[in-house]
Image: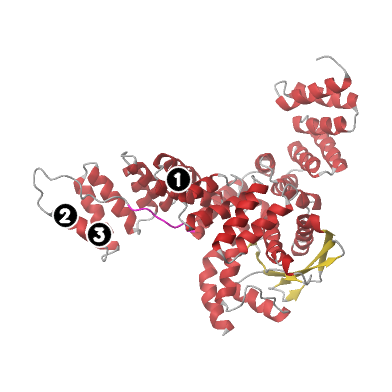
Amino acid sequence: MLGCAGFLLLAGLTLYRHADAQAAATDAESVGKNRILLVLPFDNGTGQPNLDWIREAAPEILDARFASAGFAPMSREDRTYALDHLGLPQQFQPSRASALKLAQTLDADSIIVGSYRMEGTGIVAEARVLDVPRLRMSDPVVAHGEMRDLIAVFDSLAWRLTRIMDPGFSVAQDTFLAAGAGLRLDSFEQYIRGISEPDQQERQRHLKQAVTLSPNFSPAWMALGREDFNGQQYEEAASSFAKVSPNDPDVLEAGFYGGLSLLYSGSYKRAEDAFAGVARELPLGEVLNNEGVAVSRQNHDGTGLFVQAAAADPNNADYHFNLAASLKRHGSEASALNELNQCLKLRPSDTEAQQVLAAWKAPKAADADEAGEPIERIVRTFDAVAFKQAAVVMDQLETTRLAALPPHDRAVKLAARAKDYFNRGLLLEAERLYQTAEADDAQLADAHAGLAAVRERTGDLNAARKEANEALKLSPSLDAYLVLGRLDLAANHMDDASRDIGEALKIDPGSATAKELNREIEARSGKKP
């Protein structure tokens, strides 16, 4: 029975695996990490039912860190779908044999199983990695700490597990810990309860508490937006989706459903802007179509967008229907008929299209109005797999361009991308890219300066100073001098700090950061500006 269900499930997940495996395999900074991971809920060994929420918290934290480290973890939705179609309960805790069977059925490379228990006021988390191709279960990996530091405990566990799956992985443990350092545990608990409660009203209640406690907690806003949208509370949904961070992996989905929520609320201009924002990143048919609908609802001409949608997916009958309606409305009757016929060729049973075609072909009185003209159709669902595939294609193009560059040029590009990650607060991704850049060109000062900034942010001050000095051995570096200036200022080494910032201002006299540090140094030194 398991095998039969597995074949059905495998068919459903093949596209998912292809998209994420390609994304990982073709990403220049994650070569060799093209592993599909399945993290199962951890077993509650505390004997305390009120701590059951940690079962789901474990894969949530681990999945986020694994994705940042370059792996391709299956989402909670994929895992829930998998267990459901295998006839297994969500509380399923596999043995070694059943875990292996599950991983093989899902076509996963690794599966992670674990548990947690209390020791006094502390929590102990333990996990193992099942390496499916090698049919081997790892030794237990353990992380522990105070209950109030639960997120850091699982961040530490994620780092240890990553090192097992990729022994060459060199991102520092402090960088993993920094990734979850800004999140309140009480807010995170409410979020986990909000995504795992069976009752819809309870889910909403917990998620609202989560965002109240942590107003910048993007995953909670995304989950709340989904709940509001499914409950047809479209104004509330639009507000929630708008608060999803641009750095969140679900930001494009948030933009799409935010646009839909605004369409349903009658805020057509804002809907147009939301879809346009998604289209700038991934101009897929459903996005362009809905942007065209939003334009048309404002009594403007959306024909160009419907043309793009139909070109993006020529086999979608609705896009041809919408293009026909828009062309007819704006006076291109012959072209409108051609598009309507194309719609019916793709979907002969489309009764609305049949009726519209009959009306258009029927003789019309001279004083007839256009009251019966059709309105364009909205695409109401977000195809996450299609979005992943489109993102994969874009990644492949960028990777191909990078691979063709000489090592030094490639390192410069990677360091620039890493700095963008760093500026967005994505330290783990930034460190990975800086290390890749350094591997391509060890003489690139920007890579060392970038690593210095990451080390400073994660609290490893000695390593930060070492990397900054290494950068300066290679080339004058504004970022390196800024790191040293901050470190010397924090250590109350005013003369050194003043010298560091003086050198920074020589490189860039207009640097706002350097000027602000200089003012702080002068104030603390008792010097007049």
Q: Quadrant of residue 483?
A: top right
At x 28% / y 46%, what residue is drawn? 326
How many dots with numbers?
3
Q: Amino acid at mark 2?
A: Ala
Q: CA distance from mark 2 to mark 1?
A: 32 Å
For label 3, the residue is 352
For label 1, the residue is 275
Q: Is residue 49 above or below residue 172?
A: below
Front-lying residue, 457 or 77: 77
The stretch drawn in magenta includes residue 179: no
Q: Is residue 455 above or below residue 10?
A: above
Q: Is residue 314 left or right of residue 79?
A: left
For label 2, the residue is 359
Q: Is residue 478 left or right of residue 492?
A: left
At x 81% / y 58%, what residue is drawn? 147
Q: CA distance from mark 3 to mark 1?
A: 26 Å
User: First in sequence: mark 3 or mark 2?
Assistant: 3
